[in-house]
């Protein structure tokens, strides 16, 4: 073997060793840090009962933080009541009073949508990041409960679903 091939082989071996010993562990560490937390949501039901949802039952879960005084939020609520979303778990979160949320149920006919869960954000019990997300914010969690996509402001739910796949 000539000298240039030996040098090339030695350099390739050193690079492979460097990748195996340094780069690959760093990539794995970054991936582990980048894996979002599971989608556990603790909040109040409309009966003022503290509940915890673990939306990872095999269905994709969309979470919408909203405020009924926000016209953009209202537009998103109208879109989510479309029957096209019946195959998704929809969790609607709001800081508003339970009385206001009862009126949302009536206005948008949410009793007709068993896949929609409406909860009140509790400042003492609802964990981050849900408590501090601005209204409107929408997020999609995969079937394992991991956050795969999040947007602030008006978001078309169909676009969110397409981008999350």
Image (cartoon, grey):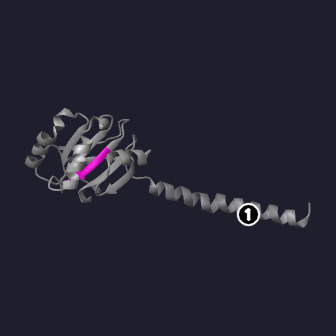
Question: Secondary structure beneath disc 1?
Answer: helix
Q: Nearer the viewer, residue 39 or 133?
A: 133
**Number of marks in the rendered image:** 1
Q: Which residues are magenta?
A: 62-66
Residue 98: x and y in percent read 10, 48
Q: Is residue 105 visible?
A: yes
Q: Is residue 34 left or right of residue 6?
A: left
Looking at the image, residue 54 sits to the left or right of residue 105; the answer is right
**Residue 22 sits above or below residue 119 on the image:** below
* Residue ID at (31%, 45%): 62
The foreground one among 9 and 116 is 116
Residue placed at 45% from the left, 56% from the top?
A: 34
Between 153 and 134, the one nearer to me in the picture: 153
What kind of secondary structure does the magenta stretch mostly adopt?
strand
Find residue 86 and report its image quarter.
Answer: top left
Quadrant of the image for the C terminus?
A: top left
State the image coordinates of residue 116 (x, y, percent, origin top left): 24, 39
According to the picture, the residue beneath numbered tag 1 turns out to be 14
Q: At 13% across and 53% down in the image, what residue appears?
A: 96
Residue at (26%, 36%) from the top-left corner?
Answer: 115
Q: Is residue 112 magenta?
A: no
Toward the right, the furthest residue is 1
């Amino acid at each position: 073997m000539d000298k240039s091939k030996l040098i090339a082989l030695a350099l390739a071996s050193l690079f492979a060793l460097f990748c195996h010993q340094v780069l690959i562990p760093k990539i794995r560490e970054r991936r582990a840090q980048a894996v979002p937390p599971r989608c556990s949501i603790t909040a109040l039901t409309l009966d003022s009962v503290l509940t915890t949802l673990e939306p990872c039952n095999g269905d994709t879960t969309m979470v919408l933080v909203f405020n009924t005084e926000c016209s953009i939020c209202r537009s998103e609520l109208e879109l989510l009541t479309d029957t096209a979303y019946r195959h998704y778990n929809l969790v609607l979160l709001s800081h508003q009073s339970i009385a206001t949320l009862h009126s949302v149920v009536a206005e948008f006919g949410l009793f007709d949508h068993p896949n929609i869960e409406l909860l009140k954000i509790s400042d003492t019990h609802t964990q981050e990041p849900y408590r501090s997300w601005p209204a409107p914010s929408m997020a999609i969690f995969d079937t394992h409960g991991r956050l795969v996509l999040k947007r602030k402001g008006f978001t078309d739910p169909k676009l969110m679903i397409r981008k999350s796949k």
